Image (spheres, rainbow, N blue to C red):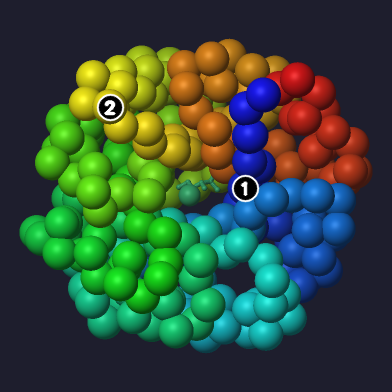
Amino acid sequence: EKNFLIAGSILSADLLNLERDVKEALDVGVDVIHFDVMDYHFVPNMTFGPAFLKAMRKKFPNAVFDVHLMVTPVTENIVDDYAKAGASWISFHPEACVHTERMLTHIQEMGIKAGIALNPSTPPQMLRYLWDKLDFVLVMTVNPGFGGQSTIPATLTKVSDIKAMAKAENRDILIEVDGGVKSSNIKEISSFGAEVFVVGSAFFGTADKKAALSSLHSALA
Ligand code: DX5
Ligand code: ZN
């Protein structure tokens, strides 16, 4: 049986009750907490800084914190700030970083899982040269910047393309999908080869979080 992970994106949580919402997510059994870091440059929106992540880490010492950097440029300084603040996983977009191999190495050297995040129209071919430094690939299934959008169907083909590329080279790669995932499409998305599902509005945007998670789980079963 496959080991699927649900990553709750706090972008859709109640901003004035983030501690409460993250606690509830972890209590009901969400596997990963996904932090969307936006800088108004890479995407037309602005969100959480490292001080915020650090405060959350203090409250939730054992949670898996997945930091999705939608910032440009990605620098070692930025990565170090989020690493020190308590990130467990860090992904960044290659358009925002000239030396992707070096940045992935840097992230891994700090004991953090390193990922490349791909926009809907970004081709995955570069991954072929990065397997050794990659712990996961984050496939954007919407254009990054906002929660609550609908999955772009063509991005799912990319998930299976990446699986096939990896398989052809005897690699296995963990694929995370981000954008528009909900109980009505999660099963189909999993059939393309995704194993980590970022869920924002379809989890944090609902009143009954326990029910929201269990409908995602039963859809996957
Ligand atoms: C979009 C973010 C996503 C977002 C997903 O830029 O990367 O993580 O929160 O939200 P939903 O699940 O509502 O599409
Ligand atoms: Zn994200």
- Pointer 1: residues within 10 angstroms few (<14), some, or many (20+)? many
Q: Amino acid at mark 1?
A: Ala
Q: Would you identify the image quadrant in which residue 119 lies?
A: top left
Residue at the farthest front position? 170
* Residue 40 locus on image (x, y percent): 34, 63
Q: Is residue 80 left or right of residue 133?
A: right
Disc sitting over residue 90 in the figure: none
Report the residue at 57% width, 64% height from top. Answer: 65
Q: Secondary structure at mark 1?
A: strand
* Residue 78 locus on image (x, y percent): 31, 77
Is residue 188 among what the camera can see? yes
Report the residue at 50% width, 28% height from top. Answer: 194
Q: Which residue is mark 1?
A: 7
Q: Secondary structure at mark 2?
A: loop
Q: Is mark 2 within 8 Å of ligand 2?
A: no
Quarter of the image that includes the C terminus:
top right
- Pointer 2: residues within 10 angstroms few (<14), some, or many (20+)? few
> Could you give the CA–CA distance between mark 2 and mark 1, rounded to whole angstroms?
27 Å
* Residue 86 locus on image (x, y percent): 53, 77
Q: Is residue 87 positioned above or below 183 on the image?
A: below
* Residue 140 locus on image (x, y percent): 40, 37
Quarter of the image that includes the N terminus:
top right
Is residue 140 among what the camera can see? no
Q: Amino acid at mark 2?
A: Asn
User: Do callouts 2 and 1 mark residues in contact (Cβ within 8 Å)?
Assistant: no
Report the residue at 22% width, 31% height from top. Answer: 124
Report the residue at 9% width, 59% height from top. Answer: 98
